[in-house]
Every structure is written in structure tokens, then in C-alpha cells.
Image (cartoon, rainbow, N blue to C red):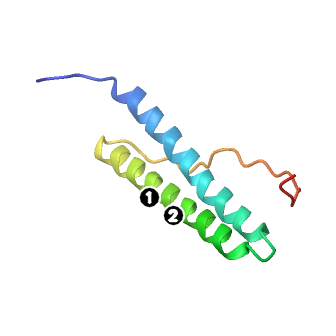
């Protein structure tokens, strides 16, 4: 089976995935700092686990970009700061 694909389009999508996953790493890590209270430990653990998973996704996307001869983006997806520290 000999399939062709639009390499440029694939690289654009992979770079967007890379940027969004890196933003996820920052976001989950940041949110883990803001958790407080007696149930903090399991919530922080879950958030940091999500950050690790996002990093793994970013690394995989970056490897695919390099494998396809592209250049991995240094950009990070949007990070919106709410300055709210509650869940309500």
C-alpha cells in the first residue's frame, strides 16, 4: 500500500498538537500549585500526572515532526490566567 499525504499539513497539525500539549503541561502544573485543603494531595497528584501525560504527548508529537523532516515549534498554546483560586 503506497499512500501519499500532505506533509506540510501534517506538520502544521503536529506542531499545533505540540503547542497545545506543552500548554497543558504548564496549565496542569500551575493549577497543582493552587490546590489547598485537606484533600490536596490526591488532587495535586492527579494534576501532576496529567502534566506528565501531556508532556509525553508533546514529546511524541515532536518526535513525529522531526521524523517527517520538520522543525518542532517553540511556541506554547494559549495560557489564560483567571486569577481565581476557587472551584465555584
The location of residue 83, given as percent across then percent down, is 88, 56
Q: Which mark is residue 56?
A: 1
Q: Is residue 81 left or right of residue 71?
A: right
Q: Which mark is residue 83?
A: none
Residue found 29% across the figure and 46% down from its top: 67
Q: Is residue 33 above or below residue 70?
A: below
Displayed quadrant of residue 1? top left
> Mark 2 sits on what residue?
52
Number of marks in the image?
Answer: 2
Residue found 81% across the figure and 74% down from its top: 37
The location of residue 9, given as percent across then percent down, is 42, 26
The location of residue 84, given as percent across then percent down, is 88, 56
Q: Is residue 60 left or right of residue 58?
A: left
Instruction: Estimate the spatial distance between the alpha carbons at disc 2 and disc 1, rounded to whole Å.
Output: 6 Å
Residue found 66% across the figure and 65% down from its top: 29
Circle 2 packing at 10 Å, graded few (<14), some (14-19), many (20+), is: some
Circle 1 packing at 10 Å, graded few (<14), some (14-19), many (20+), is: some
Residue found 59% across the figure and 58% down from its top: 25
State yes or no: discs 2 and 1 in contact (Cβ < 8 Å): yes
Q: Is residue 27 left or right of residue 14?
A: right
Camera-nearest residue between 53 and 2: 53
Q: Is residue 35 left or right of residue 62?
A: right
Q: Is residue 24 above or below residue 78?
A: below
The location of residue 85, given as percent across then percent down, is 86, 61
Local SS, label 1: helix
Local SS, label 2: helix
The residue sitting at the left extreme is 1
Amino acid at each position: 500500500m503506497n499512500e501519499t499525504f500532505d506533509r506540510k499539513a501534517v506538520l502544521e497539525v503536529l506542531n499545533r498538537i505540540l503547542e497545545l500539549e506543552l500548554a497543558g503541561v504548564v496549565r496542569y502544573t500551575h493549577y497543582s500549585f493552587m490546590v489547598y485543603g485537606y484533600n490536596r494531595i490526591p488532587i495535586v497528584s492527579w494534576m501532576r500526572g496529567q502534566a506528565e501525560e501531556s508532556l509525553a504527548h508533546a514529546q511524541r508529537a515532536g518526535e513525529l515532526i522531526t521524523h517527517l523532516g520538520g522543525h518542532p515549534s517553540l511556541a506554547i498554546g494559549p495560557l489564560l490566567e483567571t486569577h481565581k483560586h476557587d472551584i465555584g
